DNA sequence: CATGCGTCACGGAG
DNA sequence: TCTCCGTGACGCAT
């Protein structure tokens, strides 16, 4: 059933380079005899991306073969919202979003987009697998994922920040890319508009098949990001953004909300 | 209850 | 083909 016999962390890294020392696998309750330390023997080579108030980590999490298989499975498994469910109002006009979206997560979590609240579906096996791979690689746990599918280079997402109101500020947003490589643009909020208050160069990244991008604090507070149209891209990309939604509720598991 | 803030995608210009 | 800019009704926080 599970073709991934070794951890994705180990499989994606044949070089044996040392990784980011900040990224540590959390040792949870483990058998004394468990060979968990094997997981540390081949850490991911992280690439640090830094600018003013920007702090990201980028790495190839999955091998090409693994990423191909995961993409194929997600294409079968993921159930996207309908066009009607994700329609947004922009400057007085209703628009279809130029991509498809789905949300999965722990029971009861909600996704809000332009005022519409939609319940996250329960995790699928493939999404759980990828979620756990990201946890192994980063030491962070996640209770929610937003899936964006860009069918080709015409599909895109406009500049925005992820809504932080219900995100755990101690947990980075983890973005896994599968399928076509797409440019990812970051712009500082003070460098936007007609009369920018500051001159800060935009940061452009190419998000590869099987890659993982971590957006650490305070990046998302100060920087907008987008996946702009790329007319020459002819094949689909699936992006998974894993988050930790704060569910602190003394009275029990009432619905919490995720926003994007 | 009132007020203010931030948002989302398209289409046209250069 | 890419990038920048102008376009506002609405949800939500205070």
Image: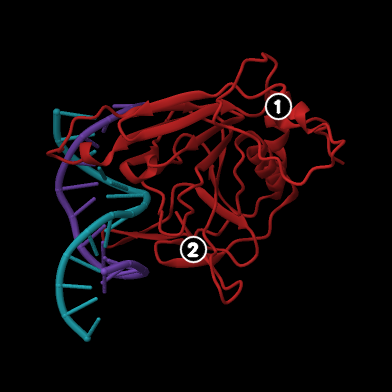
Chain colours: A red, B cyan, C purple
Would residue A232 be seen by someone viewing this image from the given angle?
no
Between disc 2 and disc 1, whose residue precedes?
A: 1
Side of A130 where A5 appears, left or right? right
Q: Residue furthest front?
A: A32
Label 2: few (<14), some or many (≥20) within 10 Å?
few
Position of the N terminus of chain A, as image quadrant, is top right
The quadrant in which residue A232 appears is: top left
Q: Are marks 2 and 1 in contact (CB under 8 Å)?
A: no
Tell me the SS state at disc 1: helix
Decide: is A186 above or below A99: above
The Cα–Cα distance between marks 2 and 1, rounded to whole angstroms, is 46 Å
- In the image, A84 versus A210, the foreground residue is A210
Would residue A28 be seen by someone viewing this image from the given angle?
yes
Question: Which residue is disc 1 drawn over?
Answer: A40
Question: Which residue is disc 2 drawn over?
Answer: A84
Question: Residue A41 location in percent, x, y?
Answer: 72, 22
The quadrant in which residue A42 appears is: top right
Tell me the SS state at disc 2: loop
Question: Residue A100 location in percent, x, y?
Answer: 53, 50
């Amino acid at each position: 059933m599970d073709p991934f016999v070794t951890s994705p962390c180990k499989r994606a890294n044949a070089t044996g380079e040392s990784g980011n020392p900040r990224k540590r696998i959390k040792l949870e309750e483990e058998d004394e005899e468990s060979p968990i330390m094997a997981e540390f023997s081949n850490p991911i080579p992280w690439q640090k991306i830094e600018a003013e108030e920007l702090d990201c980590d980028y790495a190839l999490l999955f091998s090409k073969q693994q990423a191909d298989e995961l993409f194929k499975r997600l294409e079968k498994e993921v159930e996207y919202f309908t066009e009607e469910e994700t329609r947004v109002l922009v400057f007085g006009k209703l628009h279809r979003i130029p991509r498809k979206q789905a949300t999965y997560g722990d029971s009861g979590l909600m996704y809000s987009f332009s005022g519409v609240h939609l319940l996250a579906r329960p995790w699928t096996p493939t999404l759980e697998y990828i979620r756990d791979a990201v946890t192994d690689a980063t030491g962070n746990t996640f209770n929610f994922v937003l899936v964006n599918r860009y069918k080709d280079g015409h599909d895109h997402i406009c500049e925005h920040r992820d809504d932080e109101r219900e995100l755990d500020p101690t947990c980075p947003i983890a973005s896994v890319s599968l399928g076509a490589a797409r440019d990812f643009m970051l712009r500082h909020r003070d460098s936007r508009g007609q009369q920018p208050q500051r001159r800060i160069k935009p940061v452009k990244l190419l998000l590869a098949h099987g890659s993982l991008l971590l957006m650490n604090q305070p990046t998302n507070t100060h920087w907008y990001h987008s996946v702009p149209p790329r007319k020459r891209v002819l094949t689909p990309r699936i992006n998974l953004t894993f988050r930790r939604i704060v569910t602190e509720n003394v009275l029990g598991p009432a619905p919490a909300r995720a926003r994007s």
